Amino acid sequence: MASSHNNSVDQTQSRTAGEAGWHVSRYNLSAPIPNTNKTAIANLLKGNCAVYTPIELYLLSVLDELDEHHPIIERFAKRGIICRFDELAVLDSLGRAACTMERSIELTICPTMGCNFDCPYCFEDHGRGKMSTEVQDDVVALAQRMLDASDSNCIHVSWFGGEPLLAPDIIESLSKRLMALAEERDGSYSASIITNGYLLTQENVDMLASYNVTSAQVTIDGMGSTHDATRRLVGGGSTFERIVGNLRTCKIPFRVTVRHNVHEGNKHEIDKLETYIETLAEESGNNLEYYPAPVSGNPVAENRGEQVRLLCGTDTSDVGIRQEASRFHIGRGHYCGAHNLWCVGIDYCGNLQKCWEAVDKPWVSFGNAHDWDPAHPFETASDPDNLTMYLNTACPVPDEECRECVWLPMCVGGCPHKRLFESRQCVAFKNNPEDYVLALVDRIGKNKDKDEVADKC
Ligand code: SF4
Ligand code: SF4
């Protein structure tokens, strides 16, 4: 970030860095690197992590007294570990800007809320209906209005559900129409899908690829019976063999993230499953990527957890650290698409939502695809409060503890939906910053040609 100071100072006049306004960032986390004399420092606002020698650390500790032209200043500033501006004010501005910031319009579309699985931790209340042709017309008209109002010509769709592959005809027909919209404007169209993988047959893979699906997420919760204990068919029945069979035999031209919902009953299989997925990727030639994610408490899971021995409140911080380290990015002042006007979830009835977890909850819908016009977002919303409550959870976060918190650039007060309907969710490893920094260093090690983690934004 550029300096906010206008230093119209005689360059021959010597000032210290402190006098010139430089100070150590409030968003640095550090950790000594075991068996070395070096220290890693991550800056959460800049989204940078680098390794420092004892000399560099000493220079950082005497920053105030260094000459303002000392060459280390530029190096430190580039990595964000020192600055001369108000970083909290930057986060506040970024958060305010997040509401209307657009690169593309992002639609999360549920062609159906029905699902062929019955997972005990699922947050959704599954209906059985599919999106009607009238609602599909409304979705296309809404996309057109969103493109007009945002002046964007790019569309990204996330196919979601329920299980979206229960309605491949709707995916096909909407894809064609949305791709045509983007094309009319010389824009781009891309899509991703969240599927349980059971119906990821070659025919469906080919269909998805032909409609610009560039990534998929499939969930595997452990090896064989461990997976089957939580990812079972409606009415019972195993799914592991069928899913891995699909990943093994289909030629999949897009990246597949294999999500592992980690809980007490399957966390011992993290390494085994990771190795299994790596082998499956090698054997099949498919681009498969393992991704462990802790099962966070949600009312449905907690009510049903005992049935399958889920311990939703379990300490999964080691998994959380790996997960967060893998998506380390520049501080943005907002948490997710819930903060952005151009990110909209649409259920099969055309209800509009700000959050994926709310797509089955019409009572938190802010409008309908038929009526909502983003050119007049609050006037045309059927329930403007359901829109503003999400948008307004970006920075500035009102909570004083958050405003003082070193994790704020990354956490932004946690998931907006949980903040609104449950409670503030702190970073699971809030009191364990060293392990997080070392997980980032681990990423540096895997990225051999670089000594820092690049901004992934
Ligand atoms: S509000 Fe929370 S649950 Fe909803 S999309 Fe954002 S991060 Fe996900
Ligand atoms: S929610 Fe907790 S960890 Fe996150 S910024 Fe607020 S105080 Fe910090």
Image (spheres, grey):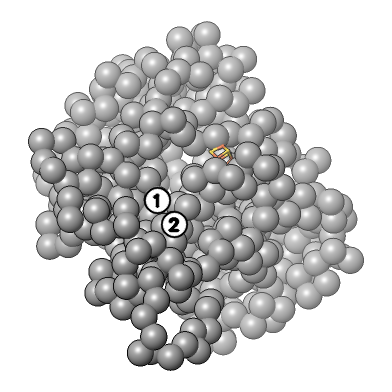
The x and y percentages for residue 128 are 65, 36
| Residue that mark 1 sits on | 28
Amino acid type of the residue tagged 1 in the rendering: Asn
The answer to whether 439 appears left or right of 379 in the picture is: left
Q: Quadrant of the C terminus?
A: bottom left
SS at mark 2 in the image: loop
Q: Nearer the viewer, residue 364 or 332?
A: 332
Q: Could you tell me if residue 291 is visible in this image? A: no
The x and y percentages for residue 103 are 54, 74
Amino acid type of the residue tagged 2 in the rendering: Ser
- The Cα–Cα distance between marks 1 and 2, rounded to whole angstroms, is 6 Å
Q: Nearer the viewer, residue 272 or 109?
A: 272
The residue positioned 50% from the left and 89% from the top of the image is 8
Residue farthest toward the front in the current orientation of the protein:
13
The residue positioned 67% from the left and 38% from the top of the image is 419
Q: Could you say which disc has been placed on residue 168 in the image?
A: none
The residue positioned 52% from the left and 68% from the top of the image is 85
Report if the CB atoms under discs 1 and 2 are less than 8 Å apart. yes
Q: Could you say which disc has been placed on residue 25 in the image?
A: 2
The x and y percentages for residue 401 are 63, 39
